[in-house]
Image: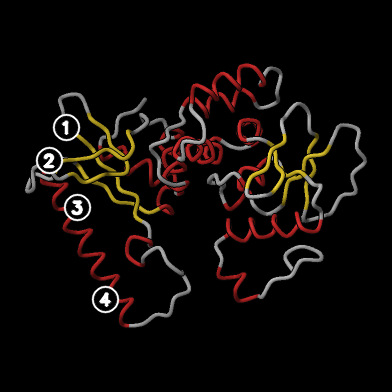
Amino acid sequence: MPYPGAYAETASFERLNARMRARAVIKAIHRIHPNWVFCLYSAALIHGLQVSESLLDVTHIAIAPNTNWRKTSGYIQSHTLHDSSITSSDNVPCIDLLATLLDCLCASSFRHGLAIVDSALHYQLTTKEELEQYFLKHGRRRHGIGQARRTLAYADGACENGGESIVRAIIIELGFAAPEMQVEIEDPLQPGHFKRVDFFWELPGGSTIIDELDGLEKYLGRGNPYAQFNERNVVSAVQAMRRERIRESRLNLTGARVLRFSYADALDTVEFFKLLSTAGVPLQ
């Protein structure tokens, strides 16, 4: 029972990732309370944006000013609705996209906000210029607007997923120059063929640094994380690792310094700072 009055088959529900579970809960709440309007991170999720798992513990509901609200402890947070427009996404009523982005960037940290706004640009749901104008018009005197504008200044639609955005935010927070994202590097053994890299810096003098975010998906595939451990899966993972080693050797032939790290490595900011600074990543 992920929400009072809503039920799911346990094994099937647990196989969903965190964002899919949160979406399922929102859809269930909508069926129980069809007049409720979703806002903040719940609206961002319904709009299809990359919301960090740590922001999905509760569901966010918009209510009119001076409305009496019976709190549902542990499940729902209510937020006063002011001038935002209400729309529908995936047949669920929610605050419109631009207002949702402003709300999220005002309320969240730089890391989490960057993942949300980067995904809106990546999916071409809006433009940075449109957001800048919207924030200028609707952000005046908003609590957190300074943080929201700082986050928007670094927004980059080239990021392919929330993990990349959060790592990029950490790099910036540590004082390093913001990297270029998803840069294509020509294969020196196959002219005309390009390999796309996650993070890229070009240094004075022309030398380059490439950072690659290593995720298990590269080796285990993007399918069900609960897939049975069997010989076929092991062979597939080994083949993926071999492809990655060959790819890295080609990148090394360009003369670039190539670093590999995991998402967990980036969250250990002390060690991550040492890694980047030792590799020569420039400071801001």
Instruction: Measure the C-alpha gap from mark 1 to mark 4.
Output: 37 Å
Residue 120: give x, y in percent of width and height: 51, 37
Residue at (54% x, 21% y) in the render = 132
Residue type highlighted by circle 1: Ser
Name the residue beneath numbered marker 4.
235
Count the numbered circles shown: 4
User: On the image, which quarter does residue 15 sit in?
Assistant: bottom right
Which residue was labeled with disc 1? 207
The residue pinned by badge 3 equals 248
Amino acid type of the residue that numbered disc 4 sits on in the rendered structure: Val
Q: How far separated are the C-alphas under marks 1 and 2?
A: 8 Å
**Mark sitting on residue 255:** 2
Q: Are marks 1 and 4 in contact (CB under 8 Å)?
A: no
Q: CA distance from mark 2 to mark 4?
A: 31 Å
Q: Amino acid at mark 2?
A: Gly
Query: Looking at the image, is 178 positioned above or below residue 244?
Result: above
Image location of residue 98, percent across then percent down: 61, 31
